[in-house]
Amino acid sequence: MDKDRVKGTIDDTVGRAKRQVGEWTGNKETQAEGAAQQIKGIAEKAWGNVKDTVRDAQTDNERERERNNQPEKDREREHAGVGSDKGHNRS
């Protein structure tokens, strides 16, 4: 999980709490601060999700590339092993 997702969750939660306190107390400034912090948190979570998605896609691509290269590596090993006795007389 990306640190921006964690930070975003915290900012969203704290912003919700501030906004609610502002509503209960009638303090418009606290309400506005809470709403702004909540929006900031939502944006941070979204950015963290994007970063996680890109990271996961890169990891998936690397795994797929490795899987696709494995048969080639196996063939190279087999080929190297088969030709190792060529030209040697075992008398």
Image: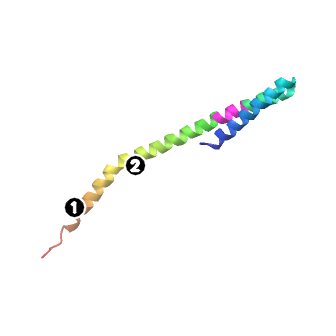
Quarter of the rendering containing residue 22 = top right
What colour scheme governs how the chains and residues are painted in the rendered image of this protein?
rainbow
Which segment did they paint magenta?
A: 39-45
The numbered disc on residue 23 is none
Q: Nearer the viewer, residue 22 or 84?
A: 22
Q: The C terminus is located in which quarter?
A: bottom left
Total marks shown come to: 2
In this picture, residue 20 sits left or right of residue 71: right
| Amino acid type, callout 1 | Val
User: Compared to 9, does 73 lie above or below?
Assistant: below
What residue would you read off at disc 2?
66
Which residue is depicted at the point 64% across and 38% down?
5
- Circle 2 sits in a helix, a strand or a loop, which is it? helix
Are there few (<14), some (14-19), or many (20+) residues within 10 Å of tag 2?
Answer: few
Q: For residue 41: magenta?
A: yes
Task: Name the spot of residue 75 as percent of width and height, x first.
Answer: 28, 54
The structure residue drawn at horizontal position 26% and vertical position 61%, both measured from the top left corner, is 80
Mark 1 residue crowding within 10 angstroms, few (<14) / some (14–19) / many (20+)? few
Left or right of residue 55: residue 91? left
Q: Amino acid at mark 2?
A: Glu
**Looking at the picture, how far across and down is residue 30, in whole percent?**
84, 29
Look at the numbered disc 1 and give the secondary structure of its residue: helix
Q: Position of residue 24 (x, y in %)?
A: 83, 24
Question: Closest to the observer: 20 or 90?
Answer: 20
Residue ID at (82%, 26%): 31
Name of the residue lying farthest toward the front: 24
State whether the magenta stretch is mostly helix, strand or loop. Answer: helix
- 58 in the magenta segment: no
Q: As displayed, is residue 82 above or below residue 23? A: below
Residue under circle 1? 82
Residue at the (37%, 47%) spot, across then down? 67
